[in-house]
Amino acid sequence: MSALDIIGHLLEVFTIIGVTVAVLCFLVWFSIRMADGRWHETTAVILRDGGEDDSVRWLTEDNSLHTQLLDEDTAHELADEESVTVFYSVQSPDRVRFERRGNAERLVWTLFIVFASTGAGSIIGSLVLTIATGSIDS
């Protein structure tokens, strides 16, 4: 076996693994996205009492008022802010987060991109290798 044969086999393995794991990651991402539901963006006011009970308060689209206590880390990050953009769950308006997408969704999407890129790069590399070795032999 020549070095080109070994490279060809490695590219095939990376293609199979990359595409298969990318498809699985996409299915998991889609499941997470559907289970998470819809989140609406709104502006929340930060309420400070000088103690450990800092909170955010926001209005939903149906004009109901909701409040959530901030943990110490989040309160420290928002120390200089008077208001902040939040995202609340349509299914449960008492749930709020500060990013549009959740951590699990972002992680699985990143893994999908990595493995899809690996699979696509391996396919392209395999095609280039096939064309290069075919043109050398003829």
Image (cartoon, grey):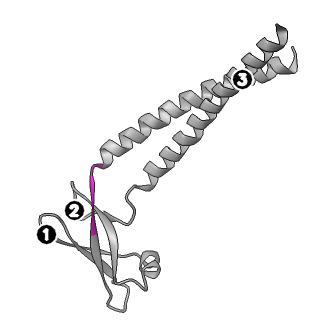
| Vertical order, 18 against 34 (above or below) | above
Secondary structure mostly seen in magenta is strand
**Between discs 3 and 1, the one toward the N terminus:** 1
Q: What is the magenta range?
A: 37-42
Residue position marked by numbered label 3 in the rendering: 128
| Vertical order, 94 against 135 (above or below) | below
Q: Few, some or many C-alpha atoms within 10 Å of disc 1 (few <14, some 14-19, many ≥20)?
A: few
Q: What distance separates the C-alpha of mark 2 from that of mark 3?
A: 53 Å
Q: Is residue 114 left or right of residue 45?
A: right
Q: Is residue 16 left or right of residue 23?
A: right
Which residue appears farthest toward the right when viewing the image?
2
Q: Indicate whether residue 86 is drawn in magenta.
A: no
Q: Identify the residue at image location x=50%, y=49%.
A: 107
Q: Identify the residue at image location x=56%, y=28%.
A: 19
Q: Position of residue 76 (x, y in %)?
A: 46, 81
The image quarter in which residue 72 lies:
bottom left
Q: Identify the residue at image location x=56%, y=35%.
A: 116
